[in-house]
Image: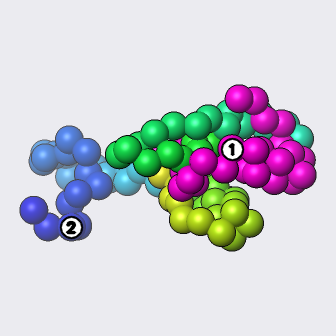
Amino acid sequence: MSNKNKNKSGVVYSTNPDYQYNEFEGDEQETLPPAQQKLYVRREVRNGKPCVVIKEFVGSSDDMKSLEKALKSHCGVGGSAKDGDIIIQGDLHAKVKSFLEGKGYKTKG
């Protein structure tokens, strides 16, 4: 399948000569200020390795990536941001939680 038709969900063919297909533009959420967000910081084991998962970040993917990058550089470890979660490698729950609270986020967990 060619890449030009991947975003057309379910439209195969239209007999209407005036039909205009409106492609879905992914509107991202506005990023809430840190004082209005409540992040859940949890210890998890993924693939047999300990990690810290930050859930329920409300905002754009660019802002989530920048927070993830700041957390990784502060802790000196790797990680990723996907599916609305920020994953930090290692058992650094206290360090991550104190960093987020220092930035003004409310944390739970």
Residue type marked 1: His
First reached walking from the N terminus: tag 1 or tag 2: 2
Would you identify the image quadrant in which residue 61 lies?
bottom right
Residue 66 part of the magenta-drawn span = no
Element at label 2: helix
State which region is magenta. 83-109
Comparing 90 with 54, the one in front is 90
Taking the spot 83% from the left edge, 36% from the top edge, the residue there is 106
Nearest to the observer: residue 2 or residue 74:
74
* 104 or 30, nearer to the observer: 104
Q: Residue at 20% across / 41% down in the picture?
A: 10
Question: Label 2 amino acid?
Answer: Asn
Pinpoint residue 83: horizontal percent, then vertical percent: 47, 45
How far from the left and from the top, in percent, is residue 15? 13, 45
Q: CA distance from mark 1 to mark 2?
A: 41 Å
Q: What is the crowding at mark 2: few (fewer than 14 residues within 10 Å), some, or many (at least 20)? A: few
Tell me if residue 75 comes above or below residue 82 in the rendering: below
Q: Residue at x 57, y 43 (%)?
A: 53
- Disc 1, SS: helix
